[in-house]
Image (spheres, rainbow, N blue to C red):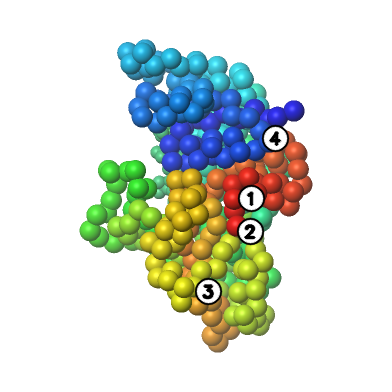
Amino acid sequence: MKVKVGVNGYGTIGKRVAYAVTKQDDMELTGVTKTKPDFEAYRAMELGIPVYAASEEFLPRFEKAGFDVAGTLRDLLNEVDVIVDATPGGMGAKNKALYEKAGVKAIFQGGEKATTAEVSFVAQANYEKALGKDYVRVVSCNTTGLTRTLSAIQEYIDYVYAVMIRRAADPNDAKRGPVNAITPSVAVPSHHGPDVQTVIPINIETSAFVVPTTLMHVHSVMVELKKPVEAEDVVDIFENTTRVLLFEKENGFDSTAQLIEFARDLHREWNNLYEIAVWKESVSVRNGRLFYIQAVHQESDVVPENIDAIRAMFEMAEKWESIKKTNESLGVLK
Ligand SMILES: NC(=O)C1=CN([C@@H]2O[C@H](COP(=O)(O)OP(=O)(O)OC[C@H]3O[C@@H](n4cnc5c(N)ncnc54)[C@H](O)[C@@H]3O)[C@@H](O)[C@H]2O)C=CC1
Ligand SMILES: O=C(OP(=O)(O)O)[C@H](O)COP(=O)(O)O
């Protein structure tokens, strides 16, 4: 039997998760919600994806445009086993009552507080914690990126300090900025450190800045080591860590621009780079401290996590079986 999946909020994350669901042989995409009949709604219809109005109040918009919706969110909830909530941050917590009432499991995204769900999730770090759960939060793109690499070297960590250089907006977002400034998050720690701690128990502090780019986030990570390790060993560990790839400046990867070009060259859908990109030359150890720099494709790194979360919630596969299945279905390189 295939798990029936609905996606509430067909935006940056929602459309990618919906696509990923269609690539799984143990899941089916029942439908997605839209608030208005814009080009994304028409594209979903072209792809044969049933489109539901996100609530009754939006129905007149669809009626006016002559767009035939399959129903409303309430109808979608009657059809599905699990709903992936990919609505704007903070809205998922409000939607939770609807999901509870309908008796469907729900996955929330990183814009929600940890308390919205029973477990905060990064597949390779804590898949087992989500087994059989009804409410799971896939942590934010940045938190996912930090957790993927830090969980791989967890035994060496005494304390982590990370600086998060965040993209200002996603490529399709013409409203957000800054356009010509660097905006610090003046509250330290930024939410990322505490968020990592909702998945793995490590000492970590983070600070964060927003800069005028849309492509990717970049993290400068510094680790006080608990026990000695060589840079080459850390490179080996990352080379053997799923959903983490090493890139060399030597090979032309000077910036996030070439990383995105790499994803384009792979003909990845939406130039998704599901893997966390670590610059190999940046991995270094000095005076008991490990340094490395990594980049995160904010639009896509959490997509495999949503798929694995579904399998864990329905106890459909054990951890590595699910990760392998998801990786193969999306063309994740390792
Ligand atoms: N964009 C990113 O870089 C990442 C976002 N996230 C998280 O994923 C969640 C979704 O973010 P994005 O996809 O970026 O947002 P988005 O703004 O691209 O998409 C949200 C979608 O929800 C729709 N929507 C608005 N009100 C709605 C309602 N009442 N009911 C149903 N749908 C409604 C919007 O029209 C839009 O299509 C947030 O929690 C965010 O923090 C997580 C990782 C990365
Ligand atoms: O939620 C996200 O996008 P957002 O900035 O559109 O809310 C990304 O996951 C980045 O957010 P973060 O820097 O809070 O981890």
Q: Amino acid at mark 4?
A: Asp
Based on the displayed image, in which of its 4 quarters is residue 157 positioned?
Answer: bottom right
- What whole-number distance in Å separates the C-alpha atoms at marks 2 and 3? 16 Å
Per the image, label 2 sits on a secondary structure element best described as loop
Per the image, label 1 sits on a secondary structure element best described as helix
Q: Which residue is mark 2?
A: 334
Per the image, label 3 sits on a secondary structure element best described as helix
Q: Residues within 10 Å of mark 1 (few under 14, many from 20)?
A: many
- What whole-number distance in Å separates the C-alpha atoms at marks 1 and 3? 22 Å
Q: Amino acid at mark 3?
A: Lys
**Residue 201 image offset from top left, x and y in percent:** 64, 60
Marking on residue 26: 4
Marking on residue 280: 3
**Residue 26 image offset from top left, x and y in percent:** 70, 35
Q: Name which of mark 4 and mark 3 comes first in the sequence.
A: 4
Per the image, label 4 sits on a secondary structure element best described as loop
Q: Is residue 205 visible?
A: no
Q: Which residue is mark 1?
A: 327
Picture layout, residue 157 above or below residue 66: below
Q: Is residue 227 visible?
A: yes
- What whole-number distance in Å separates the C-alpha atoms at marks 1 and 2? 7 Å
Q: Residues within 10 Å of mark 4 (few under 14, many from 20)?
A: some
Q: Is mark 1 within 8 Å of ligand 1?
A: no
State yes or no: discs 1 and 2 in contact (Cβ < 8 Å).
yes
Q: Amino acid at mark 2?
A: Lys
State yes or no: discs 4 and 3 in contact (Cβ < 8 Å).
no
Residue sticking out furthest to the left? 180
Residue at the image point whose x is 68% and y is 36% from the top:
25
